[in-house]
Image: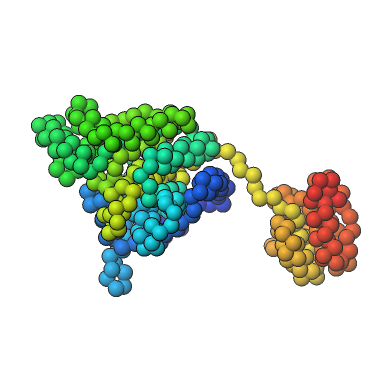
Amino acid sequence: VSASLQAPRGTFDVLPQDAAARRHVESTARRLLEGAGYERIETPAFEATELFARGVGESTDIVQKEMYTFQDGASRSLTLRPEGTAPVCRAYLEHGMHKLPQPVKLWYLSSFFRYERAQAGRYRQFWQVGVEAIGSADPAVDAEVIVLLHMLLAELEVRDVRLRLASLGTPASRAAYREELKAYLHTHAEQLSPEVRERIDLNPLRAFDADHPGTREVMAAAPRLLDHLDAEDLDHFAAVRAMLDAAGVAYEVDSALVRGLDYYTRTLFEFTSDALGAQSGVGGGGRYDGLIEQLGGAPTPGVGWAAGIERMLLAADARPHPAIPVDLFVARDGDGAAVAAFALAHRARGAQLNVQMELAGRSLKGQLKQADRARARYVAVVGEAGTVLKDMQIGEQEDVGTDADAVVARVLRGRGPGGL
Ligand code: ATP
Ligand code: MG
């Protein structure tokens, strides 16, 4: 393919050989999350740009430089979703989900889009599985979502997982802290990276995320938000930790874990894997008690997380996943049998059998080889005089006449223990 027609930079094809591993992620997530009462939600791949500007935050990297924004034919500004929380909160509002029993527990598995520097584990279209539990401020919800992500990573055998945990307090307790942090950063401005320096007033908390050596040194001695929480925030944080302890989930309280958004509140967490290189985050989230209000709803608490599918797969040992079993391969002995073979395959599929058939005009020998490659349990060789059924497991064969239903019945019976 000419370079201009290749998949765009930072995107990838999910090829058949990758499908089984991803199906395993999805089925594990579904079993775990639906078992805990989370219901599937899918929102559109694009939304009004305004939703992300308000719901992710103007000062974030995502909104400042990572969004795919375009105008549609009616000059609306639309954006390919860079994350799932704001769209799910929009759907909660739009569909009046506050009338349902709270919290409303939702999960999704979708692809997201961010214009970032493409590298291993960092793509421009990537997939996330995520949950949002909206409508309860109970610390048990924070603990539940964290434990569910912990279980998902364990079941997927993601290696060397670590959990970091912090509390951001409430906007009120954070406001005082922000001023103190800004003052501190201004006194050390000359040691900071230009990027952090320019954003001291806009988003001072982000300085904790910087890789720049000078900035890191300054931040090591910076005042910490965790030391500025009020009594209620501390109680909430202690309750979450007590439940994680009760569940045997290990974590590290990390006072440098921050996110500089006004409507993020209290619990904040991130799972990393030491098996990944620089892109070590596998999943994270937190409480966002101010977000729904920010989107125009009544004050409504919420908490959730998102985990990257590609990063989970990268950090897990590649394991072979069983191929879908083929019950029957329908071969044809001569072109004159093509229609009868087709009819038999159709009948067998109607009986819930997994069926493949000859589609490429191979010789009979070639067809048997193909059936073998597909690991078919049975091969029906349809000839003009009748059908021969071969049991590929025990190597026996049998004349089964011309009636398709009889052949199907024979396979259904033989598929159980014992064979033909
Ligand atoms: P990072 O620090 O790696 O940029 P982030 O804080 O932007 O991550 P979130 O927005 O919290 O990530 O998204 C949750 C998860 O989604 C991440 O932990 C990661 O596994 C995955 N993820 C985020 N951005 C990408 C991307 N560009 N490509 C692949 N996976 C991603
Ligand atoms: Mg990012």
Q: What scheme was used to colour the molecule? A: rainbow
Q: Depth check: give the residue in front, 315 or 156.
A: 156
Instruction: Left or right? Give the position of 375 relative to 184.
Output: right
Ligand 1 image position (quadrant): top left
Q: Position of residue 159 (x, y in %)?
A: 48, 32
* Quarter of the figure with residue 353: bottom right
Q: Is residue 218 above or below residue 319?
A: above
Task: Please give the name of the residue rendered at 71% of the width and 53% of the height, measured from the top-left corner.
Answer: 326
Q: Position of residue 92 (x, y in %)?
A: 38, 58
Q: Position of residue 136 (x, y in %)?
A: 38, 47
Task: Please give the name of the residue rendered at 76% of the width and 50% of the height, measured from the top-left corner.
Answer: 377
Residue 207 visible in image: yes
Task: Please give the name of the residue rendered at 42% of the width and 50% of the height, measured from the top-left corner.
Answer: 103
Number of numbered callouts drawn = 0
Q: Is residue 205 above or below residue 51?
A: above
Task: Please give the name of the residue rendered at 28% of the width and 49% of the height, measured from the top-left corner.
Answer: 290
Residue 277 visible in image: no
* Quarter of the figure with residue 268: top left
Q: Residue furthest left?
A: 187
